[in-house]
Each structure stands twice: as structure tokens, then as C-alpha cells.
Image: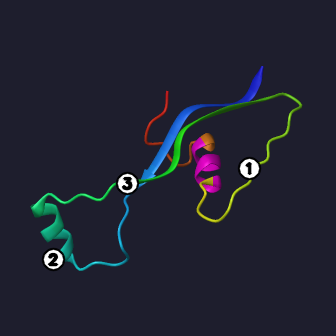
Amino acid sequence: MSVIAVQNVSKKFPRHAGQMLLRNHLTQFLAGRREDPFFALKHVSFSVEHGESLAVIGSNGAGRAGCWASSRASRSPMKAL
């Protein structure tokens, strides 16, 4: 029996180039220019059985904290089945 099961979880964030003035946000929005989102997690699935260990390794910004937070449901994932 799985003690942790995560299936098809994705977490995305808006991509932007630093701070922007409100008028710049409005100009981009009205012009229809949309930035592609940054996916910290995309279609991640795993399970941990009783007695197994799990280690998540990655560089800063790799999505380790987002993966753990989504599995705890303290942050709602953008898409999960």
C-alpha cells in the first residue's frame, strides 16, 4: 500500500522579466502579448510504499519545494488527476 502517491501533478508560475510598472502590464495585456508560463513541475507522478525512502535532488528553482508542497496539499496544484 502506498503511503504517498502523487499522480500527474503540474505547477506553473507566470514568467516575467522582473518588476514592471502597472502601465506596462496593461499595455502587454491589451496588446494580447502573453508570456509562456514557467512549469516548476510538469506531469510528475510517483509513489512511495511503506518502508521505502524518498530523496528529491535538484538545483535551486528545480521544483523540489513545490513538489513537496503539492503532495502535502498546502499549495493546490494547477492540475492533478
Q: Is residue 45 above or below residue 78?
A: above
CB atoms of marks 2 and 1 within 8 Å: no
Image location of residue 36, percent across then percent down: 33, 55
Residue type, label 1: Val
The residue segment tinted magenta is 64-70
Q: With 3 as the anchor, is 39 left or right in this view? A: left
Crowd class of label 1 (few under 14; some 14 to 19; many from 20; radius 10 Å): few
- 43 magenta-colored: no
> Which residue does the numbered mark 3 point to in the structure image?
37
Element type at mark 2: helix
> Which residue does the numbered mark 2 point to in the structure image?
23
Along the line of sight, the residue nearer the viewer: 4 or 16: 16
Which residue shows up at 57% across the image and 44% down it? 70
Please name which of the two marks, 2 or 3, marks the residue nearer to the observer.
3
Element type at mark 1: loop
> Which residue does the numbered mark 1 point to in the structure image?
56
Looking at the magenta stretch, what is its main secondary structure? helix
- 66 magenta-colored: yes
For marks 2 and 1, give the CA distance. Answer: 40 Å
Q: Quadrant of residue 35?
A: bottom left
Crowd class of label 3 (few under 14; some 14 to 19; many from 20; radius 10 Å): few
Image location of residue 62, percent across then percent down: 61, 57
Q: Earlier in the sequence, mark 2 or mark 3?
A: 2
Q: Which mark is residue 65?
A: none
Along the line of sight, the residue nearer the viewer: 37 or 66: 37
Q: Is residue 74 above or below residue 14?
A: above
For marks 3 and 1, give the CA distance. Answer: 23 Å
For marks 2 and 3, give the CA distance. Answer: 21 Å
Q: Earlier in the sequence, mark 3 or mark 1?
A: 3
